[in-house]
Image: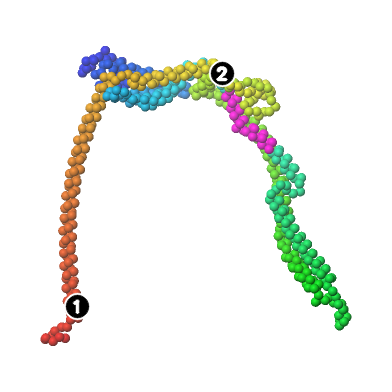
Amino acid sequence: MKKDSTNKYKYSKIQYFFWLLSGAEISVLKDCPTDYNRQAGIGFTIFMTSFLAFCSGSYAGYFFGESWTSAVIFGLIWATLIFSIDRSMVVTLKKDPTKKKQNFWMAFITRAILALLIAFVISIPLELLIFKDNIEVHKPEFIQNKILTIQGNQKTIEGIDDILNRGQRIDSDLTEVQEESKFTEPQNNPAFDQIKRNLNNKIAEKEALRTKMNSAITARQNAWSAIPTYFDSRDSIYKKNPNSSQYRTWEIRRNEATIASQNFNVFDQASLNALQKQKDDFIKTWRETLTEKEKALLDDKAKNRNKERTADDNIMGARNQIDSLLVKNQNGFVFNFMVLEDAAKRYKEVLIPIETSTNNNELNEFENSEVSQTPQKFKKVTQYDPEGATIFFLLWLIRILFFTIEILPTVAKIATPVGAYDWAIYRKEEDIRKDLEQKTSKYLEQQQRLREIEDLAEQEQIKERTKIENDLHKGLLTEIAKAQDEVARKKIEEFKQKHLPVKQNGIEI
């Protein structure tokens, strides 16, 4: 035990060491013997958390560096970080002795979240050490499941189903193109149907004009035949009677025939020829398109078959690659943690062999060509795993234990009643606050006096400047008035000399 030279209370060196770790104000704590053990307990909890962090970090560092030097260095760094965080969490949590009810919920929740994260990080390397045997047992099963899963994912990536579906679509399109090629012109083609409709309308329009012209010519001929004749004795011939009503009818029919012939002759034959050419060109282009499409489909079919073979090769290559990669890294830190997490599953997807099917692309099925020459099929079934449930329970028990250790200093500081140390810290902070407020008040008063002096000086300067400006302004106005008076007198004298009569010897000139 030790006795301080200025204090009658005794404490041990171990207590002093843990006080340093707890972040307590030792100069204040020495006068509060009832809080010696409380602060030492908080410091001891921080020490144990840092020690466990050192063990955890050293084990993790050994995994990565594979040397004790790197393990110890990383463990020290990690323990220092955890110590700093824990110490800060405790130091920043203070009580107000003047309040009957302390409100620590917000502080507790934030520190609990941080403690939860730290507990998880610290516990992971120790979990790997504790469950090392279980990890080694589950490694082969984990590797096999990963290989089969990645092989199935590779099938999805390579798009085997899409490749086969594309092959079926290509065959269907090829059959459709070959069937369409049997027709002489496009079928159910809106663009071609519109061209054909326009051409037929143009042909019908021409035929209608032709029919109308022929009918008008026939009517003209019939009207000519119906005109009565008479014998012209002078010319000794028979002539049509121009005075008859039939003759006037013939003239009407003749005009109608002339108009119909003119309409037929002015018909837009070029437009008809253009439509006919458009139809022929469309059919030609359609046939060329069908030929090119058939050729492209045949090329796509060949490429799709090559792509299918390449996808199969890539799937097997990915399987072999991931197999070698997993075997190579099976002793890594992250890999072991993945195995442990997989072993801690309460429900697992188990691969059960099923009968071999001729369809090589069923979902959730994987091939195992290493068992026999005939590919073996599997399907996934979810089952309850008692061993995994046990590991899961123990894992969370360890994590909760670490979380409890991590949050314990905060809980201890919150749960314990206000002690002498809390009162001493509160009074010391109040004294410091009052001293600062007093100094601040004096400083503010001094600054206020300085500002008042500056304001008075500034006002005096303004008055002096205003007086000088007024004097200058007054003098300037006086000078301006004198100058204006002199100019006015000079102008008056000049006016008199120019415009008023001058007396010489008493006589005005």
Rendered location of residue 351, percent (x, y): 61, 21
Mark 2 to mark 1 CA distance (whole Å): 131 Å
Q: Relative to 498, is 100 on the left or the right?
A: right
Q: Nearer the viewer, residue 187 or 465?
A: 187
Instruction: Report the residue at 46% width, 17% height from top.
Output: 397
Rendered location of residue 84, percent (x, y): 36, 25
Residue holding disc 1: 495
* Farthest left residue in view: 505
Circle 1 residues within 10 Å: few <14, some 14–19, many ≥20: few
Instruction: Report the residue at 71% width, 38% height from top.
Output: 171
- The answer to whether residue 3 of the structure is visible from this angle is yes
- The answer to whether residue 304 of the structure is visible from this angle is no
What range of the chain is rendered magenta? Answer: 145-169
The question of residue 69 being in magenta is answered with no
- Quarter of image, res 49: top left
Residue holding disc 2: 384
The question of residue 168 being in magenta is answered with yes
Q: Is residue 248 above or below residue 31?
A: below
